[in-house]
Amino acid sequence: MVDRRQTVAVTFDGVDAEGVVGESVLECARRNGVTIPSLCFLEGLSVWGGCRICVVEVAEDHRLRPACATQVVPDMEIKIETPRLRAYRKSILELLFAEGNHVCAVCVSNGKCELQDMAVHCGMDHVRYDYRSPLREIDASHPKYVFDPNRCILCTRCVRVCDEIEGAHVWDVSYRGEQALLVTEMNKPWGESLSCTWCGKCVAVCPTGSLAYQGRAIGEMEHDPVMIKRLAVARSRNEWLYPEESK
Amino acid sequence: MAAPIDLHEVTEREREERFRTRWRVKACASTACQSAGAGQTIKAIEDAVEAEDMMLEVQVIPTGCMGLCSAGPLVRVLRRGGDKAMYQKVTPETGIKILKSHVLDEETLPEHEIDTEIPFFSSQERVVLANGGVINPDRIESYVAHGGYLALEKALKTMKPKHVLEEIRTSGLRGRGGAGYPTASKWSLLAAAPGETKYIVANGDEGDPGAYMDRTIMEDDPHRLLEGIALAAYATGANQAYIYVRAEYPRAIERLDRAIRVARRNRLLGRKILDTKFDLSVEVRIGAGAFVCGEETALLASIEGRRGIPRLRPPYPTEKGLWGEPTMINNVETLANIAPIINNGGEWFASLGTPKSTGTKVFALAGDITHTGLIEVPMGTKLRDIVEDIGGGVPDGKGFKAAQTGGPSGGCIPAKFLDTPVDYDSLRELGSIMGSGGLIIMNEEVRMPDVAKYFMEFSMDESCGKCTPCRAGTVQMHNLLQRITDGDGTKQDIRDLEHLCSVVRDASLCGLGQAAPNPVMSTLQYFRSEYSALLREEVAHG
């Protein structure tokens, strides 16, 4: 099949690549097998642009832009692995580790955690900043799932998946700044939520051990974020509908 | 539908009213003077007028801000066709004394008088604040009598929208919210945007500590803002406007609501304005107490009733704004400049200020300075003139150390740059910004790391929490500054602080985060020795 979409030439760290008009720098990089570290972005969900891990430098003005939310343009020179960006990514990761209580050794997602993987990938070997060690209450009121805000990095994947894919909008962010916290419904315990459908999509997309199944021990929690992409793609193709609905 | 207001007849009537009595007592009733007791003073003067049976001789008029807020409550006494006198710190008793000495003895009261020839008054150039201390903000007639709504009438009846836009382009007006984006460019983006539905938003979410320029405009000259909005809407083809006011300004909200109702009744807003085909509805929207809602995309979210957090740009609001429709956001002070430009022409405006920063700028002068208050000067006025002449210098014989502009997004300018002209580009070169107009003067006793810590605490508290660098970075910067100001810092802490400054500046999502490091960076640049002096002695471990 001939791809009729308009293509543009871009470079990633000097290596030529082909982009498609309308796609983001991050999508383009992934299609071309180039790694741009990212956290809050998830295929199938709307773009949030909050984690700032995926910021890249664009040669024309050296300003940093989030790869997930920047569209490719012709002759774009995208820089990923510069000393400045490496240092920034490390700092942002350190900030994330310092603001919550990320203790891998006792985490259900140990070894299967996107935050942990990202730290390894970016070579973050220590945290320069003071740990904030916040006191955050675990919500284990749901019969099936547990929410541990100490491990939350506020990527809002759960908020978006619940709103956009499941349509329930159980999750949202409350308070602001350092106090920002994910809440279920009107800040009620999750178990008392009437809108939660128990679908588990929020748990599937969580990049850390913040959302997990009840009863999992250390390192036993495996997430399935790719499921959302499958869902979104199927929906865009009108799969799984009754014939009369899929017009 | 009622007939529209006849501006010329109202002006005529007001003129007669003005000369009805021999004396007019204008008393500042703005928020700053109110907090100094202006309410009681005005009441006392009004009661005295009645008790002494002077009603045919004297009229008492509450007005907006006269500028010299530190000397409030301020009262001016004007004699028909003649001399005027201005008084400071007028208590109820003094007010009665002033009234009697003028009306009964035909004499001023020198011990309370302020010389209006001092540079604080004479060096100012009042365009935006021209009506401050002159008109009664609660009466549309008072505004009309001072040339109000003439610009709107002129535009609607004799100019095409593109001519209005052209006049703004000629004026060279730049956004007064801080960044200084050319107003005409923004307007033409909205004018060129496709579709029938377009919105205009007046940004009155003034959040910088100590700044109250926009509050004063909204409280003391609400019709001026409405006229500016109407002109902007006419030029760009919008039919709906919102004024976003922070909830901390209840008086501004009340006055604007009232002004909108009165303007509608007089066919200056609403349908078929002044019997032309132009319709415009204006509504007030109230913020919920977040500094970040001054950022335009967060402001739009807040108007839509959602959580006030910024979103990524592009798309810019002029492409996709309120409810997905093209929307233009202008600062309140920017819009207050529009009517004078249309009245006097863009070239007149461009002749004020400097070639690249035209017009005037309102500043809220605060801190260690003799005259604190609201001032308006032509762009390009030297900082020294503002501090030493208008502000009357640093009091108590202390030396000037720094001027802070732009609030938590701005920087500190040291004494060696006092001769810098105050305009957008010169301030940016110094690592500060024009900002919305907060100008805080600091004397030699102020420790600059404390100043940086204060502003960082503000940014930390006001971060919305969406992006990591701003949410967690400001917390860590504040933590480092705390350690340094406590005398526990090390050289490494300063290095970490500087690194964090660049991370937060470059990687944050919106203007709040990107500008949050400015107070730290500028104090590190100009007052580094103060940071070093606070460091803990490092003991070599053997």
Image (cartoon, helix red, strand yellow):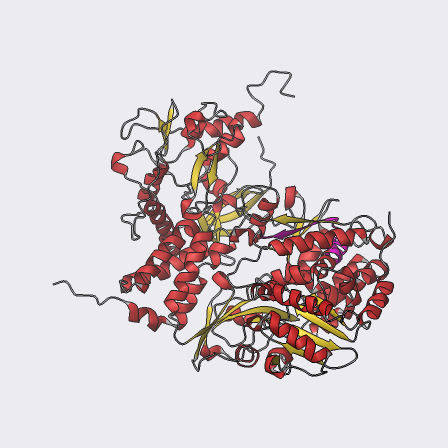
Q: Nearer the viewer, residue B226 or B220?
A: B220
- In the image, residue B162 lies in the stretch drawn in magenta: no
Give the x, y percent position of residue B337: 69, 65
Quarter holding the C terminus of chain A is: top right
- How many numbered circles are shown? 0
Q: Is residue B233 magenta?
A: yes
Image point 22% across, 68% down: which residue?
B537
- Residue at image position (49%, 52%) is A77
Q: Is residue B363 above or below residue A137?
A: below
* Image quarter (top left, top right, bottom left or bottom right) of the N terminus of chain A: top right
Q: Is residue B174 above or below residue B188?
A: below
Residue A93, horizontal then vertical, whole percent: 35, 47
Choose between B47 and B176: the one closer to the eye: B47
Q: Is residue B236 left or right of residue B376?
A: right
Provide the residue span drawn in magenta. B230-246
Q: Does the rendering let one see residue A241?
A: yes
* Residue B352 in view in this figure: no
Spot occupied by residue A128 in the image (x, y as percentages of width and height): 29, 53
Location of residue B53 (image quadrant): bottom right
Asked where in the image residue B506 lies, by quadrant, the reply is bottom left
Residue nearer the viewer, A146 or A50: A146
- Side (left or right) of B97 relative to A103: right
Of B219 and A215, which appears nearest the observer? B219
